[in-house]
């Protein structure tokens, strides 16, 4: 139980991961290529952050062939829901969503 709590808190202890969670709150499930393009991150850095958020209990992944689609886990416990509610109210400049997956332009 303590280990799970610490993983969750650790996942929140990074500005980029908070940005990623807010992006999911705004846009729902996304392909990794859409996140990479929208957030302007290299794939290896983004994958590391997504892994930490998944291990922290915030994300789920759905695979379709070579593509990975991430989204917020459901249901979430009270602590994670409260954290996401706080993230909703932060003043964060979100970049626009660029949907490469809909255009068939994913190059990951």
Image (tube, rainbow, N blue to C red):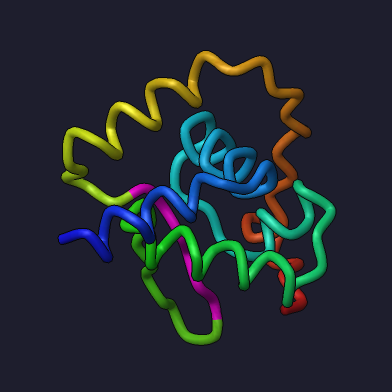
| Rendered residue at 73%/69% (across/down) | 45
Q: Is residue 73 above or below residue 81?
A: below
The residue shown at (27%, 65%) is 3
73 sits to left or right of 98: left
Identified at 76% across, 67% down, the residue is 105
The image quarter in which residue 42 lies: bottom right
Image spot of residue 98 (x, y percent)? 74, 45
Q: Is residue 18 magenta?
A: no
Dominant secondary structure of the magenta stretch?
Answer: strand
Image quadrant containing the C terminus? bottom right
| 20 horizontally vs 71: left or right | right
Task: List x then y, in percent, for residue 81.
Answer: 28, 32
Q: Is residue 31 left or right of residue 37?
A: left
Looking at the picture, tell me which residue is in the foreground, 29 or 45.
Answer: 45
Q: Position of residue 6 (x, y in %)?
A: 35, 57
Q: Which residues are magenta?
A: 67-72
Q: Is residue 68 magenta?
A: yes
Q: Residue at x 79, y 55 (%)?
A: 37
Residue 36, relative to residue 81: is it above or below? below
């Amino acid at each position: 139980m303590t280990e799970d709590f610490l993983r969750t808190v650790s996942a929140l202890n990074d500005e980029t991961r908070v940005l990623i969670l807010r992006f999911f709150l705004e846009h729902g499930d996304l392909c990794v290529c859409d996140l990479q393009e929208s957030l302007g991150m290299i794939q290896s850095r983004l994958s590391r952050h997504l892994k930490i958020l998944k291990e922290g209990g915030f994300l789920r992944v759905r695979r379709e062939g070579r593509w990975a689609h991430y989204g917020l886990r459901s249901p979430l416990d009270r602590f994670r829901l409260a954290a996401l509610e706080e993230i909703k109210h932060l003043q964060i400049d979100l970049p626009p969503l660029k949907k490469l997956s809909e255009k068939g332009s994913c190059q990951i």
